[in-house]
Amino acid sequence: MNRLLALVTVGLIAGVAVADVPPPPPPKGKKYVSVASEVKLGKDVTGYVFVKQVARFPGGQKPTYTKVDLGTEKPTAVPEPAGRTFVTLFAVPADAAKEFKTDDDLFEALGAKKVKGAHPLSFSSTATVSDTIKGDAVKWTYTITAIDKDGIKKTIEGEGAPTDKPTDKPKTNPAKDSPEDDTDTPVVGTSAPRGGVWVAGISAALAVMLGGMWLAGRVRRKV
């Protein structure tokens, strides 16, 4: 198992390095698109400081952090307009943020996961959506509707945007246990596979990642 893990990891890294190579084809009826995301607050969400973390792939570089002012009317663009980036928005309780003398101290604590009550909201620059959607890019608008001890609650609007499904709904066929079961839900970013089939999940994640990078390359070449 460890040997398989090492082989898959090496394959993942090597595959990402070849960004110009077309990725494996998406599932039937789906396609790769780039995603531009923006965020706004629900009117009842107050008392939080928001910090954007931008991590770049491959690793080796420290993530960068900036504070973000979110409003209830006009959405704020959050992810960076660049490929190979992973963006996370942290909601930090205002009282917890006040415990740090400087923003850099807060950022360092966030990176070390030492900020009490902070909750993350991750974004992806690519996704797999229905091929009925026109074009190679979509815009998704996130609305943070509430923040509690369990995390950030949100809605997402836009073409191909994922929708939250009830977690307590029983499966009609428990034998099924693969990402293809939810045929109406687009694959976003590098979501973890279900049922422990992590090898298949890594392959799917790699396909989405390469799809986005290949798509970005095609756009650059057209320009």
Image: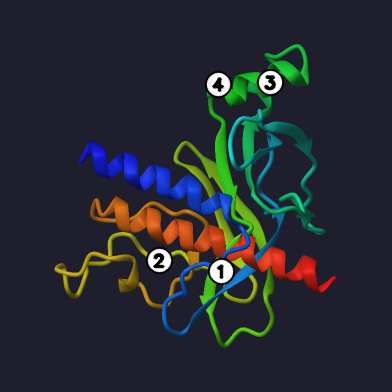
Specify the amino acid type for callout 1: Pro
| Circle nearer the viewer, 2 or 4 | 4
Residues at marks 1 and 2 touching, judged by CB atoms closer than 8 Å: no
Question: Residue 112 has which mark?
Answer: 4
x, y (%) of residue 121? 57, 46
In this figure, which residue is indicated by the disc labeled 2? 165
Q: Are marks 3 and 1 in contact (CB under 8 Å)?
A: no
User: Observer-nearest residue: 57 or 33?
Assistant: 57
The CA span between labels 4 and 3 is 10 Å
Q: Secondary structure at mark 4?
A: loop
x then y, percent, for residue 29:
46, 85
Given the image, on which type of amino acid does mark 2 rest?
Answer: Lys
Rendered residue at 67%/54% (across/down): 42
The disc placed on residue 22 is 1
- Could you classify mark 2 by the number of other residues whose Cα lies within 10 Å: few (under 14), some (14-19), or many (20 or more)? few
**Where 60 sits versus 223, above or below?**
above
Of badges 3 and 1, nearer the viewer stands: 1
| Residue under numbered circle 3 | 106
